[in-house]
Image: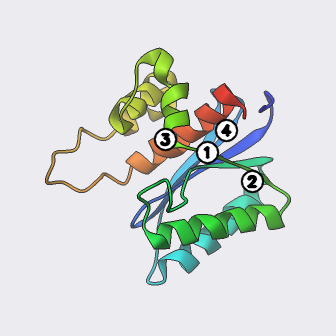
Amino acid sequence: MATAAERVFGFHPTSRGFGWVLFEGPFAPIDWGLVSAGDDKNASCLRRLERLLDRFAPETLVLEAFDRQTTRRARRIADLCTAVRRAADDRGIETAVYSRAEIREAFAEVEARTRREVAEAVARHLEAFRHRLPPPRRPWESEDARGALFAAAAVVLTHHRLGL
């Protein structure tokens, strides 16, 4: 289970890059950002992530489940997440992976079931994120990049809640 002063790094890949959040305690985000990938998306994302891991030296890296058997992740994203785990392992950083069901379980108390509802719950609980919440997505729009921040924060909050 995560301790109060443990640095936990949340990672959420997207089709354009990734979002990340660094927490120092259950409700204490200390830094976050969005990364846009270059031409070779996985290599670009991995280089940027490795710099962040070296800079912040978190004890734990958490991400949402990415295996292709149980999720609808693209092969490139699954490959990136595998490389992310390897980069964390190489640095002695513990990794934790949570399924969408586990994230929903962690947010069930606040009745958040969908990605949007979870993002709204994150915004309610983390003042620093409130003004970053993107507007609801219309069916013809692609997902707002800021959604990756909320997904990364949600997986960290899940880690603190479930501590599996």
SS state under label 2: helix
Q: CA distance from mark 2 to mark 4?
A: 10 Å
Give residue 23's mark.
Answer: 4
Disc sitting over residue 52 in the figure: none
CA separation, marks 4 and 1? 7 Å
Marks 1 and 3, how far apart in space? 24 Å
What amino acid is labelled 4 in the image? Answer: Phe
Question: In which quarter of the view is residue 131 placed?
Answer: top left
The mark nearer the N terminus, 4 or 3, is: 4
Question: Contact, CB < 8 Å: mark 4 with mark 1?
Answer: no
Which residue is under mark 1? 31
Between label 4 and label 3, give the one nearer the viewer.
3
Residue 100: mark in rendering: 3
- The reply to whether discs 1 and 2 touch (Cβ–Cβ < 8 Å) is yes
Instruction: Choose between 150 and 112: the one closer to the eye.
Output: 112
Where 149 falls versus 129 (above or below)?
below
Disc number lying in front (1 or 3): 3
Circle 1 crowding by C-alpha within 10 Å: few under 14, some 14–19, many from 20: few
Q: Would you call the spot at circle 4 few (<14 residues within 10 Å), some (14-19), or many (20 or more)?
A: many
Query: For the point 35% across and 34% down, which residue is it?
Result: 114
Per the model, the C-alpha gap separating discs 4 and 3 is: 20 Å
Disc ID at residue 56: 2
Distance from Cα at disc 2 to Cα at disc 3? 26 Å
Residue at point 50%, 22% (across, down): 125
Q: CA distance from mark 1 to mark 2?
A: 10 Å
Q: Earlier in the sequence, mark 1 or mark 2?
A: 1
